[in-house]
Amino acid sequence: MPGEDERHLLAAIELARRARENGNHPFGALLVDDAGDVVLEAENTVVTARDPTGHAELNLIRRAGERFDPDFLQRCTMYASTEPWGRFGASPGAIPRAPISIFRAARSSRAQTTRST
């Protein structure tokens, strides 16, 4: 794994730790632009916001959609502390529909990189 990917995945894991400290489930996500700069961070807020959709990845996608245009997001990569699929993960339909072009997860039972279409 290239150094930059590892650095961003470790930052996502740190966000997960922070989410746990804040009373939520330990999941974090961040958005990185094509220059390698972190432009947005999100952590899980399911417990504290009493919102079952408050998964880190969904929080990130919602905020990114509010702040950035789709052309910019097409050049971004989302890094997450773990893959957002599975029984209690974020909606598997939300990430492929987001204009973010690349997704990487620190912990995954599948391939670590997916591209949205």
Image: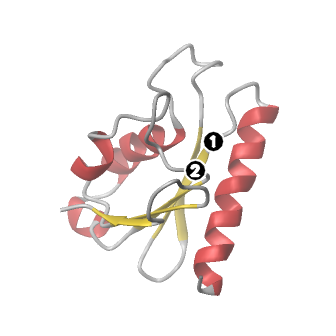
Residue highlighted by disc 2: 82
Q: Is residue 54 above or below residue 86?
A: above
Check the picture and name the quadrant holding the N terminus.
bottom right
- Bin the neighbour count of mark 2 within 10 Å (Cα to Cα): few under 14, some 14-19, many 20 and up: many
Q: Amino acid at mark 2?
A: Thr
Image coordinates for residue 2, horizontal then vertical, percent: 59, 86
Compared to 111, does 64 lie above or below?
Answer: above
Query: For residue 38, which quarter of the picture?
Result: bottom right
Drawn side of residue 102 relative to residue 110, left or right:
left
Query: Looking at this view, is 111 or 81 the one in front?
Result: 111
Say whether residue 72 is left or right of residue 54.
left
> Which quarter of the picture shows residue 4?
bottom right
Q: Whole-percent x and y of residue 87? A: 46, 29
Instruction: Determine the residue located farthest toward the front in the rendered image.
Output: 109
Where's the C terminus, which quadrant? bottom left
Q: Secondary structure at mark 2?
A: loop
Give the label on residue 12, or none: none
Q: Which residue is mark 1?
A: 27
How far across and down, in percent of the image, does residue 78 sit? 45, 61
| Mark 1 Cα-neighbour bin, 10 Å: few <14, some 14–19, many ≥20 | many
Q: Is residue 20 left or right of residue 44?
A: right
Asked if the residues shown at circle 1 and circle 2 are in contact, with their CB atoms under 8 angstroms apart, the answer is yes
The amino acid type found where label 1 is placed reads: Phe
Residue in the picture at 57% in, 23% down: 46
The residue shown at (25%, 61%) is 116
Q: Nearer the viewer, residue 95 or 64?
A: 95
Q: Secondary structure at mark 1?
A: loop
Decide which of 88, 59 is in the foreground and name it: 88
